Image (cartoon, rainbow, N blue to C red):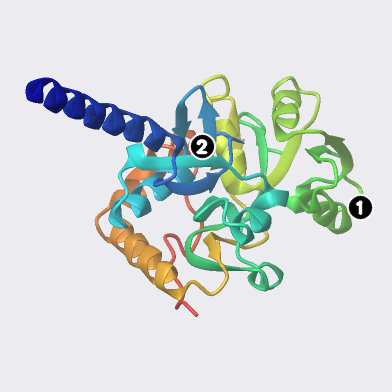
Amino acid sequence: MKIRRIGAAAAAVTLALGLAACGSDDGGDKLKIGIKYDQPGLGLKEGNDYTGFDVEVARYVAEKMGTSADDIQWVQAPSAQRETLLETGQVDMIVATYSITDSRKEKVSFAGPYFIAGQDLLVRADDESITGPESLDGKRLCSVTGSTSAQTLQEQVPGVNLQEFGTYSECVSALQSNAVDAVTTDDTILAGYAAQPQYQGQLKVVGASFTEELYGIGIQKGDVDKCEQINEALTEMIDDGSWQTAFDETLGTAGFVPGPGNPPEPDTCS
């Protein structure tokens, strides 16, 4: 009888442990990191695979903070929802082409920056006629509806023929098919599209950026301790060569070269 009771108790313990293990699959103890799911070369979700420069930065930082890549819970972070995701605690940090601005710093804090991007132009690889905004007069320029990128260029070059599509993927497809002459947004996003297998060798980033965007890692407002941990990890990533390797294997495959100031030194946390 005693043996049976011991066996039953052991079975109960085993069952409880099994249930606990199953319960851990919900990601409750995982580091929740917000990324883009639809930006090739930066943050792209294909099935259960996550790839891109932002993803590699996030993995490195997470590991330095004590969380393995397998224990990261990836969360989709569309641009319009990033502040809300942080403010409500749905994510622990966001690494998603998140430009540091004064208005955003009123709601969230930033570690970094980890990359300096700039608005640029994507053209066909054999097109030598477009060298920058000044050569867009009379050209067909594509951007996403409501994009500040398109508005900026239209103000600078009134003679440009602006065509707005719903997504950058549509713009890039139109560029490849000769329906437009150029696409504009952040150079990193453009390089990510040019690096896709179906476009390799066919498209190029002009390399004449005319704005400056500092990509930071978004965290909850006032979390100085986390900011300092992230900045320490970013510094190590740069110093040990992992930053350059991550860039070369993602955005760099399109022949894109980081602009001046890269990799940047993280700002002091406050």
Residue 130 visible from this viewpoint: no
Q: Position of residue 261 (x, y in %)?
A: 47, 65
Q: Which residue is mark 1?
A: 158
Question: Which residue is found at the position 53% from the left and 30% from the top?
Answer: 45
Q: Position of residue 238 (x, y in %)?
A: 32, 59
Farthest residue in the left direction? 3
Viewer-side residue, 132 vs 30: 30
Q: Looking at the picture, which amino acid does disc 2 mark?
A: Gly
Report crowding for label 1: few under 14, some 14 to 19, many 20 or more residues within 10 A (C-alpha).
few
Q: Looking at the picture, which amino acid does disc 1 mark?
A: Pro
Viewer-side residue, 51 vs 228: 228
In the displayed structure, would residue 97 be above or below residue 228?
above
In-image side of 176 versus 189 (left or right): right
**Count of numbered circles in the view:** 2
In-image side of 251 versus 166 (left or right): left
Report crowding for label 2: few under 14, some 14 to 19, many 20 or more residues within 10 A (C-alpha).
many
Question: Which residue is found at the position 56% from the left and 19% from the top?
Answer: 198
Question: Which residue is found at the position 53% from the left and 67% from the top?
Answer: 110
Question: What is the spatial separation of the Cα atoms under label 2 and label 1, in whole angstroms?
Answer: 32 Å
SS at mark 1 in the image: loop
Question: Which residue is found at the position 34% from the left and 37% from the top?
Answer: 70
Q: Quadrant of residue 180?
A: top right
Q: Which mark is residue 41?
A: 2
Q: Quadrant of residue 248?
A: top left
SS at mark 2 in the image: loop
Front tag of 2 and 1: 2
Q: Quadrant of residue 221?
A: bottom right
